[in-house]
Image (cartoon, helix red, strand yellow):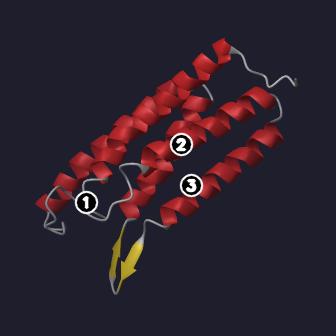
Amino acid sequence: MPDLGFDLDVLVSDVALVLLAFGLAFPIGWERGRGRHSAGFRTLPIVAMAACGFAIIIEMTAPQDTEARARVLQGVITGIGFIGGGAILKNGGNVKGLVTAASIWNAGAIGVAVGLGRANIAVVLSVVNLLSLWLLTRANHATGNGDGHKGGDRD
């Protein structure tokens, strides 16, 4: 039987990292997912989880190969940008989904940070993203730039 590289200690550690990435992106997804046509509730935590998984894989398989790490990160960033692009909708002169797209991209950064052992950065990204969504939405509505949608800015 081939060695599949299964190690219970590593498995527990990897599960903890993936769950941390999921947990840090979940509140952002929850905030973005409050609208009728949202892409956030499930998408953002899954993006963070997947990005974390890619970061764990590259960290474990090529920790000293900066070129390989750069290629993997470039692919993750590009792929997440593609997913975020799908959240952007243009209807005439109105563009919606930019904030959700940016939050999806940030969820990817959260996952990569966790996967590369930088949970402190991931926490900061999560907290600042949430504060930005809450506080800047209120400021946007206070200045009369909001769309009047109950629950905050839906762009």
Residue bearing the label numbered 2:
109
What quarter of the picture does the C terminus occupy? bottom left
Residue 131 spot, x, y in % from top left: 28, 41
Reading the chain from its start, which is encountered first: label 1 or label 2? Answer: 1
Specify the amino acid type for callout 3. Ile
Farthest residue to the right: give it: 1
Q: In which quarter of the image is residue 92?
A: bottom left
Near mark 1 (Cα within 10 A), the count class, few <14, some 14-19 or many ≥20, is: some
> SS class of the residue under badge 3?
helix
Q: Quadrant of residue 63?
A: top right
Near mark 2 (Cα within 10 A), the count class, few <14, some 14-19 or many ≥20, is: many
Q: Are marks 1 and 2 in contact (CB under 8 Å)?
A: no
Q: Could you tell me which residue is drawn at 68 percent across and 45 percent down?
A: 73
Q: Could you tell me which residue is drawn at 58 percent across and 17 percent down?
A: 12
> SS class of the residue under badge 2?
helix
2 sits to left or right of 34: right
Residue 130 spot, x, y in % from top left: 31, 42
Specify the amino acid type for callout 2. Ala
Residue bearing the label numbered 3:
80
The nearer-to-camera label among 3 and 1 is: 1
The nearer-to-camera label among 1 and 2 is: 1
Residue bearing the label numbered 1:
35
- The residues bearing labels 3 and 2 have C-alpha atoms spaced at a distance of 9 Å
Specify the amino acid type for callout 1. Gly
In the figure, 115 relative to 86: above or below?
above
Q: Could you tell me which residue is drawn at 62 percent across and 36 percent down?
A: 53
